[in-house]
Image (spheres, rainbow, N blue to C red):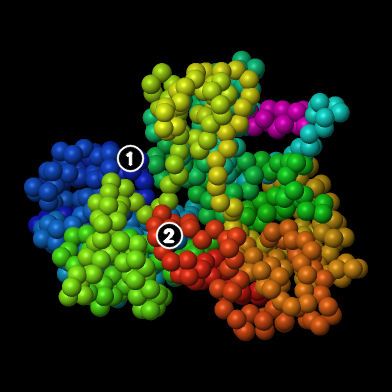
Amino acid sequence: IASLYADPPKRVGVLYISPLKALIDDQFGRLSLVLRDSDIKLTSWHGEAETGMKDSLRRDPSGILQITPESLQGLVYGDKDEAKRLFGDLRFIIIDEVHSFMDSDRGIQLLCCLERLQRVTGVCARRIGLSATLSDLSAAESWLSASTGVPTVSEVCPAEQKREVRILYSRIPAENIDDGSVARKLAVGRMYMRMFHETEGRSSIVFVNSRITAERTGRSLTKMAERMGSKMRVFVHHGSVSKESRKAAEEYLKGGHSDVTTVATSTLELGVDIGSLDTVVQIGPPHSCSSLLQRMGRSGRRGGSQSLVLFCNDDAQLWWSDVFGVSVNLIRSIAMVELAVKDGWVEPPNIAKRPYGILLQQTLAYLRDSVGARFTELCDEVLSLYPFRDIPREDYRALVKHMVGRELLTYLNDGTLVLGPQGERIAFGKGFPVVFAGSKDIEIRFDGKVIGTVQKIPEIGGNILLSGRVWAIKSVSPDGSIAEVVESEGDSDTSWKSGAPEYHRKVLQKMREILLSDEQYDYVDEDGLRKLNESRKAAREAGMDSLKSDMGDFTRITPWIGSRQYDTMYRMLRAMPGVSVIRHLEPYIIDYRDDGSYSNIMSSLKQYSHNFDLVELVTYKDDLIVRKYDDLVPEALLMKEFAADRLDSNFDTK
């Protein structure tokens, strides 16, 4: 800002890119105060920003522009002359929460846009990435430099705050029809009572790993507060709750209230300012060490220590809560605390090698605002973009041929490629710049106001759970896209589909290390320590302390490798002649029988992996369509993408 004030740019001087509209709005308010006595213009640009502000920037481009990747694509791939006029004197590109972009589809899109912007304007602005959740700085440096040829230097601010964690363990029995599940209900009640005492009278966030857990927890804490006569206000915050409800929760937290608890998924992980929290709770181990640090970092924002209470609940109705007597939830919770909190380690990004769906979208974007291009030009202008560097030219040729067959593209008589009828429909459609896949959700309304969305609804009169409250379906629109509801009593559930979590090999290896040691952890409660010692004994009895164990009439492998490596090993064992897999509990064990021809199964697996392409392990059961435009990509390319980005034959267990 000081450099803009001392030497005002003739055009937009700073491009600030955020993963969240809410974060842009939050930063806009803060920066407006900083800039109020200067002549530096501040513009917020996203789908919900004021049109007048955007028009003002177009008339007089200057100052700082805050924008999302989707809106940036509209400016970069539009009129070249306007792009030059807007960004011809760009000095800085600031990418906030850069870790959230590095292994996401929006990050691929962002790098494409930035490289395109540099080509159009001829300006190589200085890139600055901001993150409080990175450990592999070399990966972040490479990602930020991308195609610029300019090296990135990391500046690490030392973390001086203390970090405190407590793990509270509970065992929840399975339902029992004979006794009306009394033991289960009592255990669940004790767990929520414990959580209520951790949050009551405080400003708190309870983080969970799924939307349905958020809804159940929000409902249960509300009922607990009512029963205890507490004034505690409980909100539910996730992607299927309306924007208005989420904003109300954020404003209530910002207001400094000491009687508010918000139950949230990852929607409150990133850096929207919600003030100083007294307590952060996590239910179950999060899906990554990165999430653990992000969530923990929500506390201590005003100089105090960061603290987190992790409720580790083993539900006997879920198989993964107990693997042969081993509480994998508890062991993983301890492993993540040791890695993230003690060692400061988080997972490196999984950067896509062959994002064919986004290559298709970027091809349409390039042709959308051009008079057409030959294949060689598309290779020079689109395939050459940094995120597509691992995609062979012949694969791009196959993709373009397929796009012609689907009428996304069409050839002119001189061999020039232009948008076809279907390509025009997509490229000029409203949601074209959005590269992440969305679901066709049903909008839920109460008294005409949107309260959120669900993926399916029961019959009229049936109940759903949304925004922490139970609703009865009153009516449904003719096309099934909108449902009116009224408040209802009783219990209900609402389920949302989501992908299975993946765990890094370092987390699994730390779990093995914990099981093999006799260390007692002072942040784990008495019940948890008792279960830890029981799990160590059970692991030895089940052969989980060894890579390979003879279990009598079958062999057990406990590789302690990451989810992707485990999945690849499982597929490979099933493909090996003479091997019969009889059971697998992902990502922990594989039980198999063989015909005796494999004296060293790990060596055989390594040798076997060298003899064929991983594409051969992809089957018709695999969900190949994961990105928004993947349904337009040839299946053969999607199989290559699956093998490159979701399989890994590095079975090193060290």
Pick whichever, 2 or 357, lies toward us.
Answer: 357
Q: Is 411 on the left or on the right of 174, as rendered?
A: left
Nearer the camera: disc 2 or disc 1: 2
At which x and y percent is residue 21?
33, 43
Q: In this view, does 276 lie above or below 617?
A: above
Q: Point out the stretch of residues depicted in magenta.
A: 183-196
Q: What element carries label 2?
A: helix
Q: Is 386 on the left or on the right of 297, as rendered?
A: left
Report whether residue 212 is seen.
Answer: yes
In the image, what residue type sits under mark 1?
A: Asp
Residue 185 part of the magenta segment: yes
How many residues crowd around disc 1 within 10 Å: few (fewer than 14), some, or many (20 or more)?
Answer: some
In the image, what residue type sits under mark 2?
A: Asp
Report whether residue 380 is seen.
Answer: no
Q: What element carries label 1?
A: helix
Residue 605 part of the magenta segment: no
Q: In this view, does 433 lie above or below 203?
A: below
User: What's the residue at 69%, 78% (across, down)?
Assistant: 605
Pick whichever, 277 or 115, lies toward us.
Answer: 115
Quarter of the C terminus within the rendering: bottom right
Q: Is 451 on the left or on the right of 92, as rendered?
A: right
At which x and y percent is residue 558?
75, 66
Report how far apart the C-alphas of labels 2 and 1 lie in the structure: 34 Å
- Give the labeled residue for mark 2: 630
Q: Which residue lies furthest to the top in this view?
A: 229
Q: Is 75 on the left or on the right of 95, as rendered?
A: left
At which x and y percent is residue 209?
58, 44
User: What's the residue at 13%, 51% (across, down)?
Assistant: 62
- Give the labeled residue for mark 1: 26
Q: Is the magenta stretch mostly helix, strand or loop?
A: helix
- For residue 170, what is the image quadrant? top right
